Image (tube, grey):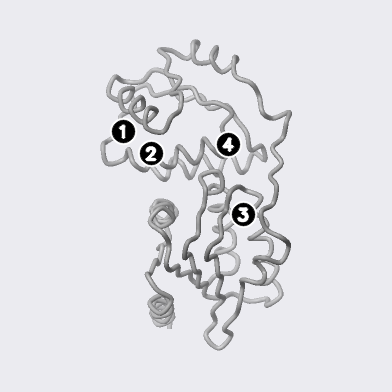
Amino acid sequence: MNMLYDVIEDRIEQSGEPLWYFLINYKGTRIEPGAWFAYGRRGKDLNLAHSMGSVRYDTTEETRAQIERSAGTDNFDPNLFADRADAIERLRSLPSKREARIVHVPNYVPGTFAARVSFLPDQDIMEVDFSNITFAHSRDVDDCYDEIEARLKETGRKWYFLVNYENTKIFSEAWIRYGARGKALNEGWSLGSVRYAPGSETETDIRLRAESRGFRPNIRNTREEAMQRIDEMKAEVS
């Protein structure tokens, strides 16, 4: 399930267009009970970040019932239809948001995130302090990663990443961009990443994405435990 959402998110990112109508064909689809949590959580993030409206059709009775239950819990219109023609007709009635582009107001002043980056050269560690930071939308994410990447470029080398997530909040609207920028930063500059002190919601989202992106989340409770994990990672490659 996570792999499916990874592909959808990547395709949207590649398109260069953040907003789309979602038309979903459920013909012959079966979602096992163990997959519903990831399906619902990742779907919510995707819809909040990129959907101008979602319409579903040709569901089985079992899937329809589960979607309707989720809709009642999360307060959204499931827009369930018997066939594609009716679903398309519903999409045509929904307003477009592309003409009125969403311009996010930045929540942080320039230099906020650069000041939260420090380096421990003797230990090959770059430390990032996200404590008490809220990523409300993609603009917050881009402002953050632009500054971190600039600091890394100044060093001209790769580092082990040590990230403090104490009281960090990442809203659904920000998660997709956060995942994309984090992946790019790690591929370009990281020797390995360890995270510590995330709240339960943030830890859940990190673990869901780690399952399908092929990386170890390396989550620890304290900074000391995270440093020990970095020592273990160094030993694994020596």
Q: Position of residue 153 (x, y in %)?
A: 69, 71
Q: Mark 2 against mark 3, which lies toward the viewer?
A: 3
- The residue lying toward the viewer, choosing from 3 and 179, is 179
Residue 50's label in the rendered image is 4
- In primary-sequence order, the first of circles 2 and 4 is 2
Residue wearing tag 3: 141
Residue wearing tag 2: 39
Callout 2 touching callout 1 (CB < 8 Å):
yes
Callout 2 touching callout 4 (CB < 8 Å):
no
| Picture layout, residue 21 above or below residue 183 | above
Quadrant housing the C terminus: bottom left
Q: Mark 2 against mark 1, which lies toward the viewer?
A: 2
- In primary-sequence order, the first of circles 4 and 3 is 4
Mark 1 is on which residue type?
Ile
Badge 2 element: helix
Badge 3 element: helix
Residue 31's label in the rendered image is 1
Q: Position of residue 96 (x, y in %)?
A: 66, 24
What separation in Å lies between label 2 and label 3 (alpha carbons)?
Answer: 24 Å
The answer to whether 228 appears left or right of 127 in the picture is: left
Residue at (50% x, 60% y) in the render: 168
Question: Dot 4, how many residues are within 10 Å of its Cα: few (below 14), some (14-19), or many (20+)?
Answer: some
